[in-house]
Structure formats: C-alpha cells, structure tokens
Image (cartoon, helix red, strand yellow):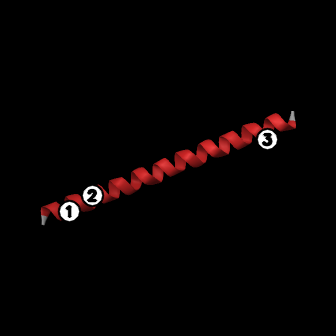
Amino acid sequence: MTRKILLALGIAAISMTTAACNTVKGLGRDIESVGQAGDDLT
C-alpha cells in the first residue's frame, strides 16, 4: 500500500516538473519573439 502511494506521488512530481519546464520554455520563446518584433520595427 505504501509503495503504491509513493509511486503515485513520484509520478505526479515528475509530471508536474515536466509541465513546468515546458511552460518556462514557451514563455522564453514568447519573450524572444516580442523582442524580435520590436527590433523589426526600428
């Protein structure tokens, strides 16, 4: 029983970490594209 709970918590932690990494990467790309658009205007 305890092993199943620990396994489920581990899987949940890995899933959340992966989702957070993807979110940060996406945010970085968005900021980069805004900067590029600003450079194109000048």
Estimate the spatial distance between the alpha carbons at disc 3 and disc 1, rounded to whole Å. Answer: 48 Å
Which tag is nearer the camera, tag 2 or tag 3? 3
Q: Please provide percent x and percent y for residue 41.
A: 13, 62
Dot 2 or dot 3, earlier in sequence: 3
Name the residue beneath numbered marker 3. Answer: 6
Residue lying at 40% horizontally and 54% vertically, measured from the top left: 27
Q: On the rendered image, what quadrant is the N terminus found in?
A: top right
Mark 1 secondary-structure assignment: helix
- Indicate left or right for 42 with 31 as reference: left
Left or right, residue 32 beside residue 4: left
- Label for residue 17? none
Q: Secondary structure at mark 2?
A: helix
Q: Identify the residue at horizontal 59%, vertical 49% (top origin).
A: 17
Is the residue under label 1 in contact with that under label 2 (CB below 8 Å)? Answer: yes
What amino acid type is highlighted by mark number 1?
A: Gly
Quadrant where the C terminus is found in the figure: bottom left
Foreground mark, 3 or 1, reads 3
Q: Circle 1 sits on which residue?
A: 38
Residue 24 image position (x, y, % from top left) = 46, 54
Which image quadrant for residue 35?
bottom left
Crowding near pointer 2: few (<14 within 10 Å), some, many (20+)? Answer: few
Which residue sits at x=28%, y=55%? 33
Give the spatial CA distance, label 2 vs label 1. 6 Å
Residue matched to label 2: 34
Mark 3 neighbour class, 10 Å CA radius: few under 14, some 14 to 19, many 20 or more:
few
Horizontally, residue 15 falls left or right of residue 10, namely left
Kindly identify the amino acid type of the residue bearing the numbered disc 2: Val
